[in-house]
Amino acid sequence: MGNPDQKERFQFEQALERLSEVLKELESDDVPLDKAIELYEEGMKLSKLCSKKLEEAELRIEQVTRKENE
């Protein structure tokens, strides 16, 4: 995994997978309040990370598209 793009993709996919796990845990009926708060905080961090990675990817796509259209 020496390629930086592969590393970023792997990090994004891991974060997205963990976010899915966090959501499942939060949806369960037997999560204590303290644990739910911890999970919520983790989920928010993961959500921000994923959003940032998606924004970066969108910008890169726009740049490539502009170059191709010039």
Image (cartoon, rainbow, N blue to C red):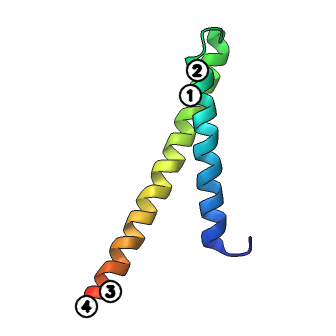
Disc 2 on helix, strand or loop? helix
Looking at the rendered structure, the kind of residue marked 1 is: Leu
Q: How far apart are marks 2 and 4 (CA)?
A: 48 Å
Q: Distance between the residues labelled 1 and 4?
A: 44 Å
Q: Mark 4 points at which residue?
A: 70
In the picture, measured across the screen, residue 2 lies left or right of residue 48, that is right
What residue do we see at 45% from left, 49% from top? Answer: 51
Q: Distance between the residues labelled 2 and 3?
A: 44 Å
Residue 59 image position (x, y, % from top left): 38, 68
Looking at the rendered structure, the kind of residue marked 4 is: Glu
Q: Name the residue under label 1.
A: 23
Q: Earlier in the sequence, mark 1 or mark 4?
A: 1
Q: Residue furthest bottom?
A: 70
Q: Is residue 28 above or below residue 10?
A: above
Residue 57 image position (x, y, % from top left): 45, 65
Residue 27 image position (x, y, % from top left): 55, 18
What residue do we see at 59% from left, 54% from top? Answer: 12
Please state which of residues 61 and 35 is positioned toward the viewer in this rendering: 61
